[in-house]
Amino acid sequence: MKKVIVAFLKYYLFWVLFLTAFKVFFVVYNYDVVANLPSADFWGIFRHGIVMDLSVAGYFSMVPGLIFTLGFLFTSRFSSYFLKYYTLGVLIFLTVLGLSDAGLYPAWGSRLNAQLLMYLETPGGIYASMSWWQLILFPVLWFGIVWVGFGAYNRFLPRKKLAEIRMKWFGIPVVLFLTAALIIPIRGGVDRAPMNHSNVYFSDHLEANQFAYNYFWNFMHSVLKNKKSKVEVKYMAHDEAEAILKAHDKNGLQAPQIIHPVEGKPTNVVVVLLESFSNKVIEPLGGLPGVTPRLNEFCDEGIAFKSFFSTGNRSDKGISALIGGHPSDMSRTTVLAFPDKMSKLDYFPKYFAKHDYNMSFYYGGDVNFYNTRAVMIQSGIDKIVSKTDFPFELALKQKWGVPDEFLYARMFEDLKQEKEPFFSMVYNISSHEPFDIPGYHKFPGKSTQDRYLNVASYADSCLGVFIDSLRQTPMWDHTLVVITADHTSLEPGPSDITEPATYRIPLIFIGGVVKQHFISERIGNHNDLAPMLVKQLGWEHKPDLLSKDFLVDDSYAFYFRGEGWGFISPEMGWFMNENTQKQDFFYNYAPAKVDSVMNFAKAYVQYLHDDPLKD
């Protein structure tokens, strides 16, 4: 019996050591994120995170616990083989998840979660996001880690020695008790509350807390939570939240006219959706100098908005909000994952289709990614051009597909022949990780930041050529070009993943119908563009409590992550962490208004998470 107990405890310890080693690997792989943390926070990643590792080790020791309890009573040979191959299977699975977690963190800014499942529906997106060295390194690391881990297990618990163990019947209650006792580390202690993120939260730096997570626990928690399809918020009753939002609605007010259509000619609209772009690289909007000279010019010659925000940090969230008019929330997926809800969206392009515009969409990548084709078709766009419509050699020039210069060239040639009026949207890919545009070396450095700045500069130059070409056509005088982005990039750093700078994206209007030139401080979101622009063109926009004409309505914006939500207004800005109920203020110029502003913000978050599309 003693040998069985020792073997069981050693088995549990094996998983604790393996998971701790993977945490070390994660920290080393993403060291630049935590390099500047205080030493106490750095070591706290391991000291506070161990409780979650102990929990996961407990999960994977439950079945072996039953084998140790009963298997060695009847057949030690079978039990030792079962433990060996059970352990190998778990090692393979955990290593794949762990490597995915480490590799995706720089792009996602969060630990592995249920969003991975949506990527698996279109695995080409995962391939396209990986650089060549990652494609080589991943299988090498996977084989190496499994080989070392399995070797360590065989040395820790040799099968031959396990096969020699004989269990006595009177030892069954003892080992069963030890197995049942695993519920203590699984739950994170003896308190009534089960293990959750708060168990490992210890720092004011979100990155330190994230690094303390166990990747398997976080992934499974996200997957199980995601099955509900929405996050539950309990700030107030739905009716109360709706009443507060209606009280703030200013739908009847008239905004100043900033778009001036040419009399007798409908306004053509071209929407440029930039991949992973933020104001951090656009100088007039507070960004670095010299990265995007053409966008800098467009800010000066047209109308630019300095405080326009994405509602989330991934492409599907940007598309959902900008095209579908539905902001992202704290769920891991968006409305785009639910076809029954997609049909209820108030699609931005549909307003143009209803006014007999010719509709088109251009994308250099796989148009099926994130259900993009379905979104465009439902929004009234009948002409969709993607990488399959280009020569094969062009589609292979980048991991994601066709580089921007060829995408814009195709779009321009088509628009010259397009019947007016038209609504045409282009979604670039060259600024998407892994930042692999060939033959362009304005920023020749090898760091992630230099590689991002290089592709941002390339995307800017290609857009500039496209705009210059449009200027030379007669259509320019009655055309509006809207330039914005799907979400930002964490580069160039440093910026915390909860800070407003990480969600501030460009919104620039240029074209012949733009007569004024200024940079606006008005605050808005992706989903606020449609109400504002539709009204500027003299049409009626469907009333929506979650979207506004941000030229006239209250000036505010939200952004959402799995951990919580951020709010920005002229009076104050904060990030509310739902895991810890901690509210971090970025600024607070009006302390007397905290309660009223907070009440409105919570009403918005409540109404959004109550799912207004369910009816």
Image (spheres, rainbow, N blue to C red):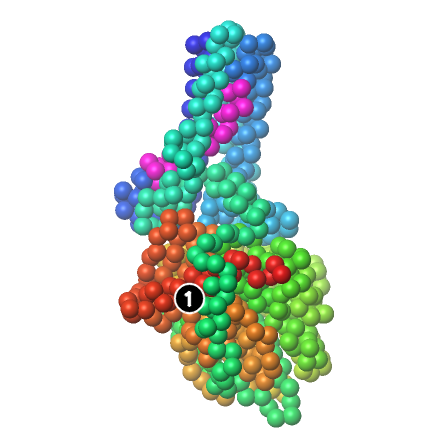
- Vertical placement of residue 169 versus 239, above or below: above
> Within the magenta stretch, is there residue 217?
no
Q: For the magenta stretch, what is the residue range?
A: 45-66
Vertical placement of residue 532 versus 606, above or below: below
Figure quadrant of residue 492: bottom left
Q: Nearer the viewer, residue 588 or 215?
A: 588
Q: Nearer the viewer, residue 193 or 399?
A: 193
Q: Quadrant of the C terminus?
A: bottom right
* 268, 454: nearer the viewer: 268
How far across and down, in percent of the image, does residue 275 sit? Answer: 53, 63
Report the residue at 67% width, 63% height from top: 343
Q: Is residue 380 above or below residue 20?
A: below
Q: Please, what secondary structure does the residue beneath circle 1 have?
A: helix
At a point 46% along the width and 49% down the height, the residue shown is 110
Any part of residue 160 in sight? no
Q: Residue at x 37, y 48 (%)?
A: 580
- Whether residue 40 is visible to the viewer of this picture, yes or no, is yes
User: Which amino acid type corresponds to the residue marked 1 in the rendered image?
Assistant: Phe
Q: How many marks?
A: 1
Q: Is residue 529 left or right of residue 380?
A: left
Query: How many residues crowd around disc 1 within 10 Å: few (fewer than 14), some, or many (20 or more)?
Result: some
Most common secondary structure along the magenta stretch: helix
Relative to residue 85, is residue 578 drawn left or right?
Answer: left
Q: Is residue 50 magenta?
A: yes
- How far across and how far down the image is residue 598, in percent? 38, 63
Determine the image quadrant of residue 96: top right
Q: What percent of the width, then of the height, locates residue 563?
A: 44, 51
Instruction: State the residue at coordinates (42%, 73%).
Output: 555
Determine which residue is flagged by label 1: 600
Residue 198: percent from left, percent from top: 38, 43
Q: Determine whether 383 is above or below 312 in the image.
A: below
